[in-house]
Amino acid sequence: EVQLVESGGGLVQPGGSLRLSCAASGFNFSNYAMYWVRQPPGKGLEYVSAISYNGGSSYYANSVKGRFTISRDNSKNTLYLQMGSLRTEDMAVYYCARVDSGSFRGPQDFWGQGTLVTVSS
Amino acid sequence: EIVLTQSPGTLSLSPGERATLSCRATQSLSNYYLAWYQQKPGQAPRLLISGASGRATGIPDRFSDSGSGTDFTLTISRLEPEDFAVYYCQQYASSPYSFGQGTKLEIK
């Protein structure tokens, strides 16, 4: 059974940093590209970042470029999102999601349950 | 950057009726690079259907998609009670891989 479990969310002050993790199981993690997608409270889905199956390529939304870094450790079946210079508008539930191929350009067929990041002083 | 606009924002229908949800892109893209997701309150989104892979596993055939260029449609042929949710379209043709703002399908 495919499982994606996010962790690392919590309360952080504006300007602070946080690292999210997504532990994958039930599939060959190293064969799949992965996304981070977020959802502010009561709002819609927002693409954050994507990484290729081997970590060699990554993309970011303009709103997080230069502040967030996506990475992965295929030996640990884990996806990461290092978030810095956090703003109140970054407050959201953060989901990791699997792309149904090794390429970025595919639908996300499995999603984790999300982890909440709260940015507040 | 491709922006997706979904309409209507809210759709009020009764079980058994047909639902038609629209997604319009600011640039032409192949339907291969467009997907639809369903999200219920308190749950993660669920992939419904995509141009690349068709209906996702377990998705009933009352869900179908169509469209090309800049105009895309998700159709639910006969609404079941479990279909009332929020629906999002997404393009993954070019980064940033944007989502539409969502259509809320509510019971009339």
Image (tube, coloured by chain):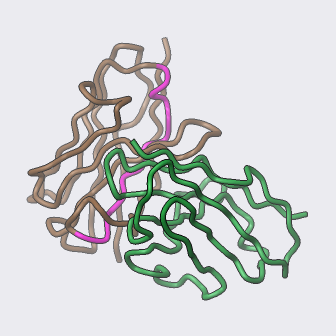
Note the chain letter of the green one: B
Looking at the rendered image, the quarter that the N terminus of chain B falls into is top left
> Quick check: A35 above or below B73?
above
> Quick check: B40 above or below B83?
above
Residue B85 visible in the current orientation: yes
Identify which residue is drawn at 79% across, 74% down.
B81
Magenta includes A96? yes
Magenta includes A93? yes
Residue placed furthest toward the right: B108
Note the chain letter of the brown one: A
Identify which residue is drawn at 10% across, 58% down.
A54
Q: Position of residue B22 (x, y in %)?
A: 65, 61
- When asked about the image quadrant of residue A28, the answer is bottom left
The region drawn magenta spans A88-101
- When asked about the image quadrant of residue A16, the answer is top left
Q: Position of residue A11 (x, y in %)?
A: 44, 25
Task: Judge from the rendering whether residue B5 lies leftward or rightward of residue A96; answer left or right.
Answer: right
Identify which residue is drawn at 12% across, 52% down.
A55
Looking at the rendered image, the quarter that the C terminus of chain B falls into is bottom right
